[in-house]
Amino acid sequence: MVRKLMSDVPLEERVGYAIKRAFQAQRAALDHALRDLNITVPQWAVLVCLDYYGDASNAELARLNACTPQTMNEIVRHLEADGLIERQPHPDHGILLPARLTPAGENLLAACMERVSAVEARMLAPLTVEEQKLVRDALNRCVQALQEEPAPV
Amino acid sequence: MVRKLMSDVPLEERVGYAIKRAFQAQRAALDHALRDLNITVPQWAVLVCLDYYGDASNAELARLNACTPQTMNEIVRHLEADGLIERQPHPDHGILLPARLTPAGENLLAACMERVSAVEARMLAPLTVEEQKLVRDALNRCVQALQEEPAPV
DNA sequence: CCGATATCAGGGGGACTGAAATTG
DNA sequence: CCAATTTCAGTCACCCTGATATCG
């Protein structure tokens, strides 16, 4: 224990550190749970979006996942190559190329959700329902606070 | 809104989804805050570990950050190339190569902490101190629950 | 002409597995 | 011999910036 430069608040007592650890633990558990299904967490997140919001273009998926269209394009190409989604030109807007789940994609998503739900249940087991609600609402307020100001530098 | 395969709980009401969003927002804000300091978030995390726990070998740093020694080795090589850390063979254990902060590393870490603290303050502004404590403790319990069982498959 | 979209080109940090050499 | 450490080699999904072409 040296801590010459950290502020007076120990690492273990920082909320940001707890968020980082929780995300890493969740991400690792999800990675492991989805590994033998041959799908990554970002890819699974796209399948969830398509099931949840319906057909969506690459640009829409990028906005939903907070990444660039170029990054999303690569994820989408993987999913398309694996036959999990298909894309047909939009009938009215020639440039739009909305993606939709294929039957194979729906089947794989269903299998993913079983694994994901098991991980979530394990993660939330120590919390009461009230605590879960409070944590969720508090984190959502944090996200909103970070997104309101685009970092004043 | 289609939601053919998701369970009955909407996406927005899932704690796991809130954790993911909070981490992504925090990570994006930190990326932006540290960008002009020419250091990445994983690299900064290593500097924090060295300041917080003292000198540490590559294997120790890998364990602290929950990644493989190979991955940590690459991060450490970046930091060493930038003159932020230095490594000297351990006097008693010839194979150990503990890393320590250089003066340049300490200065950069101090600059990083200013930016990071500003981000954290912005993120936690909507929460009361009690809420911060509850969120932190709840998340820590979640991490513990995930780490206890190594995924029963 | 402009805005939004899709996509190609290029690059980089981070993460992994596999394997080899070293040391206690 | 074994366990831990370090590190080379190779691979990959992801994420970015820049640039281009297309459509409304």
Image: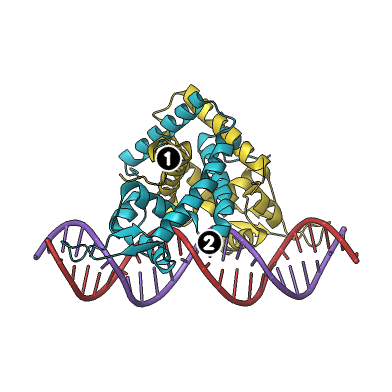
Chain colours: A cyan, B yellow, C purple, D red
Where D8 falls versus C3 (above or below)?
below
Is B70 on the left or on the right of A46, as rendered? right
Q: Circle 2 — which element?
A: loop
**Numbered mark located on residue A38 in the image:** 2
**Numbered mark located on residue B119 in the image:** 1
Taking the image as drawn, is residue B20 in sight? yes
| Quadrant position of the N terminus of chain A in the picture | top right
Front residue of B112 and A22: A22
Where A108 falls versus A4 (above or below)?
below
Is A118 on the left or on the right of A69, as rendered? right
Front residue of C4 and A108: A108
- Picture coordinates of residue A30 (x, y %)? 54, 49
- Picture coordinates of residue B110 (x, y %)? 52, 45
At x 34%, y 49%, the residue is A64
Parent chain of label 2: A
User: What amino acid does circle 1 point to?
Assistant: Val
